Image (spheres, rainbow, N blue to C red):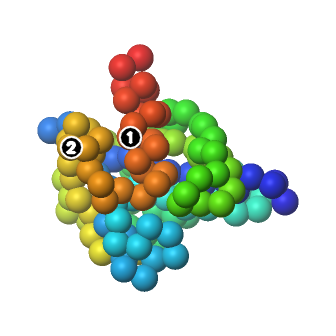
């Protein structure tokens, strides 16, 4: 098995430019009660794209067959206070028309502007890293 855990995550963008995040449940093993990005661990013998489809089907009622997904970038978040190992992330983006979908894992979905997200103190460590260092660079290129 790869020594670095791999994760696939997706940022949803609404027509007004707001981004959609997942409010994690209070008993979540990582980031309990915090805002995170939809996605999860890439399983052995699974591609990041396969993981994304599986995770979205597990976590939401979204129709993955009709979701226009774009791969943005892959990157490593070094081990830190919130996680003891380095993590390899594959970041995707997709447009959503609204928040009219069910969240099966976590409490619910929330939308916020990028500026608001970058100021929040209730983000998971990985979401904080993505919105401070990765996503703003991708949208300005």
* Residue drawn 46% across the image and 77% down it: 28
**Mark sitting earlier along the chain (2/1):** 2
Can residue 87 be seen in this snapshot? no
Left or right, 15 with reference to 6: left
SS class, disc 2: helix
**Depth check: 130 or 79 in front?**
79
Residue count near mark 2 (Cα–Cα under 10 Å), binned few <14, some 14–19, many ≥20? few
Query: In the figure, is residue 14 to the left or right of 7?
Result: left
Please, which residue is most extreme toward the right here? Answer: 1
Q: Where is residue 126 in the image (x, y as percent from the top left)?
A: 48, 52
Q: Residue furthest front?
A: 81
Q: Measure how far apart labels 2 and 1 are at the Cα level.
A: 10 Å
- Identified at 33% across, 47% down, the residue is 12
The residue tagged 1 is 131
- Residue 110 visible? The answer is yes
Q: In this view, does 26 lie to the left or right of 87?
A: left
Residue on which disc 2 sits? 116
């Amino acid at each position: 098995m790869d020594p670095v855990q791999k994760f696939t995550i997706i940022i949803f963008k609404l027509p007004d430019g707001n981004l959609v995040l997942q409010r994690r449940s209070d008993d979540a093993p990582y980031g309990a009660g915090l805002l995170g990005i939809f996605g999860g661990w890439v399983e052995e013998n699974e591609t990041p794209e396969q993981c994304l489809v599986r995770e979205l089907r597990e976590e939401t009622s979204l129709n993955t067959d009709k979701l226009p997904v774009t791969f943005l970038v892959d990157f490593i978040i070094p081990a830190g206070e919130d996680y003891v190992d380095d993590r390899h992330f594959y970041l995707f983006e997709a447009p959503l028309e609204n928040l009219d979908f069910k969240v099966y894992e976590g409490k619910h979905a929330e939308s916020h502007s990028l500026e608001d997200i970058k100021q929040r103190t209730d983000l998971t460590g990985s979401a904080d890293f993505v919105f401070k260092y990765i996503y703003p660079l991708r949208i300005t290129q």
